Amino acid sequence: PRTTTMAARLCLPLLLLPAFLLAPVATAFEQNGAFIDSTQDTNTQNDFVFADWARARAAKEEAREDSANNIRIFVLPHSHDDPGWVRTSDQYFEFFVKPMYTTAVQSLLENPKRKFQVVEVIYFRQWYMEMTPEVQKQAHTLVENGQFTFAVGGWVMPDEAAVDYPDLINTMAMGQEWLYTTFPGLRVRHGFQVDPFGASSAFAVFSSKCGFESHLVARFNYFDKGWMQDTKNLEYIWRPSDALYQSPDKLEIFTHMMDMYAYSSPGIPQDAAVEHLCAKGTKAEDCPGAGFYWDGDDGNPYFYWAKLWETQGYGPYPAVNSTSVQFYADILVNNSLQRADWFATENVLWPFGTDFQHFNASAMFYSMDQIIEYVSAQNGEGQRYEGVQIQYAGLGDYFEAVAKSKASGWAVRGSGDFLPYSTLNCNGLADKTPGPCSGDSGPQYNVSWPQTWSGFYTSHMYIKIQQREAARKLRATAQLVSLLELSSNPVIVTGSDIQGKSEDLNKLRQAVGLLPHHDALTGTMGPGCGNGASKLPRVGYGSEKDLANSTEQDVQSGDTCPTLPVGRPGDIGEVAGDYSHRMKLGTDLADKVSADAAQKLLSKSGPNGAPKLSTDDLSFKMALKAGNSASLAVQNPLAWPSVRWVRLDVPANIKDVEVTDGAGKTVEHDLLQGGANACIGEDAKKLCAAAKRANEGSVGAGEDQNSLYFRAEVPPMGLAVFHISPKLEGEGQIAPVEITDGNATVEGNAYVVKFEGGKLVQVEDTSTQGMVIPLTQELKEYPSYDETVNKTSGDSWHLTATAARSGSYLLHPGSVEHQPVSGAFEKPKLEVVRGKYVVEIRQWFSPTHTQVWRMYIKESDGVAGGFLELQVGAGPLLPNRELLSVFDTKGKILTGIKGANCEDKDELSSTFYSDSNGFQLQKRVYSAYRSFPDGSCQKISSKPTEVLALNYYPMVRSAHIRDDEKMLSILTQQSQGVSSQKPGQLEVMVHRRSAQDDSKGACQVFNATSGGYANIPLDDSEGTSCQNFQTAGTCRSDNCPAYAVPMNIS
């Protein structure tokens, strides 16, 4: 048995996993089938056809003459529980998750055949810790006998596009560690990535290295899914890293791609529900909803449905009874037969649940028990369900059966990923369409278009930046605590001291572990109750006490939205505010831990002891402003010596400084007039005044500052102290701002850059014998899809749409042409600040679009200064804008290839590279076509704007273009989107703002720059009626409740 020690060992480059996670297993699957290197295709839509079982069975026999008629249905009871989406994590826990696990325990104890799958450990742990010892003991019993099954096992179900690799490790290790220590020896063996928006190759690598026997994905391109369904290739062996497959590990993993029904139980056509489940003569609108959800849905908390049961005697979906059981059984078996035709074995995985389901597990299992018993009683020869076996199951049961049915002969796929994710809206189409359709496309649409989920790579940039900074803080502070624990001086360090620091640091670890959730870091969370919670209508979102104080009419109409305990209120919405608040609390505690740990470590290493350390930035600056000296400790968490230039904003009254190290030796330093976007000169002051008015109340709109740089040499995994002594009088050595006419040539240590007309036009790489590249870079923008009419007045809100709209999830630009930023000057204004060691080039494209280029002079260390640093400042954007940073080598880096265009093989398509979760690089080809292993090729779209969205990819750490001689590489401090429309070009989406929801469920509109909330009482869009949306308390055609209103991310 493995120990629970969290010691880490190196198992592959850049991958440090806790020891307990490293458990390779011998896979039950072998491969001797065809090698498939590309998996992109389209197919004919497979519609759900409601038919009697005999007709479906006859069709199956005809289609599968070479196999037995038997199928095995593995009913997988599960619930996918987002730790925050349109509600906060704690609200979801109270409203759904807590009663779900409580009733699940009761239900599992009643029937040993029942099983229930656990995924999000953050919730399971929260429930477990609140339970009595008796209930905890029952949970242990259910884990031991296999009724509680586990998949993924992470703190959350992480995003796979925008999350950084160390953060994947952290969130997965947190969940796995808690399970392993709480239920000794428990190992999670199966993946269940059903809701992340696309699948990365890096996460498949991680799953394999963690000893997973299988990997499961639900959301991937409709054209890939269509081809896989038609060719029975939804299961295969994935080799997600070419290099690691070539290693002794032979890394690969058996992968299951869910079919067009994804991870939810199928719905039932309304006409069939009226016929079979309601009394004769019942109107369709009066017939309760029909599906395999007998406890209600997540539109309201569990106690809302409990009140319905109490007052009406039944829930929204009547339980299965002797009259309806055959109807439900036929639906389930018919659906399973359809699914069986898409897979290579007779085994069918049938998900029983969806988001936040089973919050009354007793009601769910009561009805499903009857269906399973009914089918099992009639599966003999000549009976209604001949040859059909059905059982409750976990993923292990299903994959074991698949391995027994087909132990070898599986197709193999290479290291390509499944990004970006795209769905297809088919509403209004009479003809069959290429690929499975999306069911959440919005009722007012009457045309078809692909919906590309590549906007979230850049959405909610504030959260992305804050999360990456918090994660760096976590790793650096954890290292200080470990070094302190290893200290041999018991006077300085005590066991209780280390315990307290670890507990404080764990707050940040939990926050950083939460943010990789696929509706957190992605920026796809909803607004929650917003800032003025008590003024906003909401459907039953209060606590049970709040509900008790409301009238029944209030509850039914959704006119209550009591203020709930959440994090820091702000203009980013309640849910995002909760995430941000958790990170802020954790970071504040970590700051205190790091300051105390650093001071104790320094006190034993220097002859003069350590200065009193804190992380109070304000008191540090106030000391300097008053002319007092201040000290700064710099940490190097790397395992080798580090040389870097540290940049500090210091008060503008400082005219000169002296910087010395711990030994009193003078350190190279520079003081530059103004901050990064300083207001120097009359023109700049006017721009600053306009920008400050636009950003009133936001960070960065405060007093002027100067920029201090100093060269810090820090030992491996060590600390170094620097002392800063300011001078407030005299001329000093401050580097002044040079206001140019837009033309400048500036020389740094590694590069010479040339600007003309305020824009970059050329870069000379002096380290390669003067190679000159005509490189241009500009801030540009796309309008978001502009065939949307969006009018706002004091008492109404109107929206009609004829195509997909950009929103928090989707990217659908209105043009493929790079357009000047809104409010752009005729030519950018250019300033240069030349110090002795550092030079800044400051650009103003408009009052609210700025850039600072930074180079280092006389720096011999390539890591410290062998690059161009680019800092972008933007906002507020105008509504419906996608902001870009566009790099163009004018064809001097030859990145084009031929053959991607199926209709014109000689057409040159652009190629570029982006990283997969910061772990490995993926080659990308900009194309409107997708080719398939069987030699077929399909044009995905003829509209250039849709093609552009389909060719945007995540850039978590880096992207580049290259040919045999040259490479342009971009490194980023947070996740963003990246693409390349033409050879030699690279564009990065750095910020975005949308004025409408994109109908993907979050019901958010990143619109108002004030942070205020608009009044949206009605939506009288053509083709909609209020009747359809009464449960949301609104007449909005996107089915978003009235509280889903504009909020500020600019």
Image: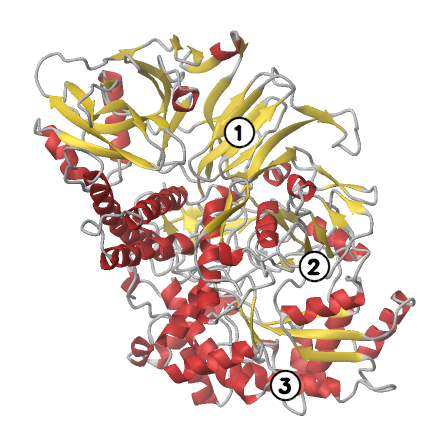
Q: What residue sits right under mark 1 in the picture?
A: 987
Instruction: Report whether residue 795 is seen.
Output: no
Q: Position of residue 938 (x, y in %)?
A: 77, 42
Q: Position of residue 792 (x, y in %)?
A: 40, 48
Say whether disc 3 or disc 2 marks the residue closer to the N-terminus.
2
- Residue beneath the point at 63% across and 82% down: 368
Say whether disc 3 or disc 1 marks the residue closer to the N-terminus.
3
The type of residue carrying mark 2 is: Thr
Say whether disc 1 or disc 2 marks the residue closer to the N-terminus.
2
Placement of the C terminus among the 4 image quadrants: top left
Instruction: Report whether residue 965 is seen.
Output: yes
**Any mark on residue 369, and which?**
3
The type of residue carrying mark 3 is: Asp
Q: Residues under labels 3 and 2: Cα distance?
A: 33 Å
Q: What residue sits right under mark 2 in the picture?
A: 27
Furthest toward the bottom, the residue is 322
SS label for mark 2: loop
